[in-house]
Image (spheres, grey):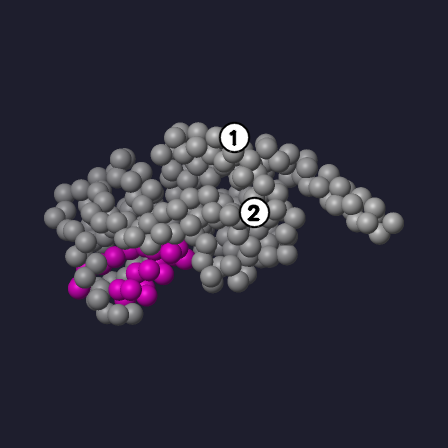
Amino acid sequence: MKKILFVAFVLLTVGFLFGAKYIVGVSADFPPFESVENGEFVGFDIDLIKAIGEEMGFEVEIRDMSFDSLIAALVSGNLDIVISGMTITQERAEVVSFSKPYWTADQSVVVREDSDFNVTVLFGKRNVGVQTGTTGDLWVEENLVETKILTGDFKRYDTYVLAMTDLINKNIDAIVLDAPVAEGFAKVRPVKVVAILKTYEDYGIAVNKGNKTLLALINEGIERLEASGKLDELNLKHF
């Protein structure tokens, strides 16, 4: 009897999840993963979470907020899911649960297109910008600022767009940001990538620590998209 009741509970839980609607947090200044075009959210992460939802039978509502607010909003229950080019780190994994990785990235060093700087722009009295709360932020602080390799201004921005504007306006000398995003900016802004920092970062989809059922649903969705070739199609579309 207990076994029958348990199976019935599982079936009811799965049935409840199918057809549900989840609030998904992004920081929509991170092309080609997420951005806004003509008032619509677009990008690899947007297509991915929608594809997972379609595969697993749930709907999503996208909400845009600053990157460093996403985990707090997830923990507080204001978001159900976060997908925003977020690197799986030990510190983050202590407060949220991550899906299996869906992307691996490195960090890039970006300078103005007319600049003669190379990777040595990170050394000495240069001014370097990052987006607050990102792994680029942590990398620069731990490897350059704390070691005093970088002695100029270390500037944090709410978005990469603000950092890019300051770079183009010559208020800073370089930005450190995720490689795919750097390449995207270099196609549409007067900037260039001068170095790749091999950090081997895995991106994951985050859910509340206690929501193991939703996490399992997302992981199953990723696995199905991998098996069907849909994930490869999204890679080709955006990269």
Looking at marks 1 and 2 on the same chain, the residue that comes earlier in the sequence is marked by 2
Residue 166 appears in the figure? no
Residue furthest toward the right?
1
Q: Nearer the viewer, mark 1 or mark 2?
A: 1
Instruction: Please state the horizontal and vertical placement of residue 99, each as a whole percent of the image.
Output: 53, 48
Q: Is residue 110 above or below residue 95?
A: above
Q: Do the residues labelled 1 and 2 touch (CB within 8 Å)?
A: no
Q: Is residue 139 magenta?
A: yes
Which quadrant would the C terminus be assigned to in this image? Answer: top left
Q: In this view, does 114 lie above or below 140?
A: above
Residue that label 2 marks: 81
Query: What is the quadrant of residue 234 in the picture?
Result: top left
The boundaries of the magenta stretch are 124-145
**Dot 1: within a 10 Å radius of its alpha carbon, few (fewer than 14), some, or many (20 or more) residues?**
few
Question: Which disc number belongs to residue 170?
Answer: none
- Distance in Å between CA atoms under marks 1 and 2: 23 Å
Residue furthest toward the left?
116
Q: How many labels does the image show?
A: 2
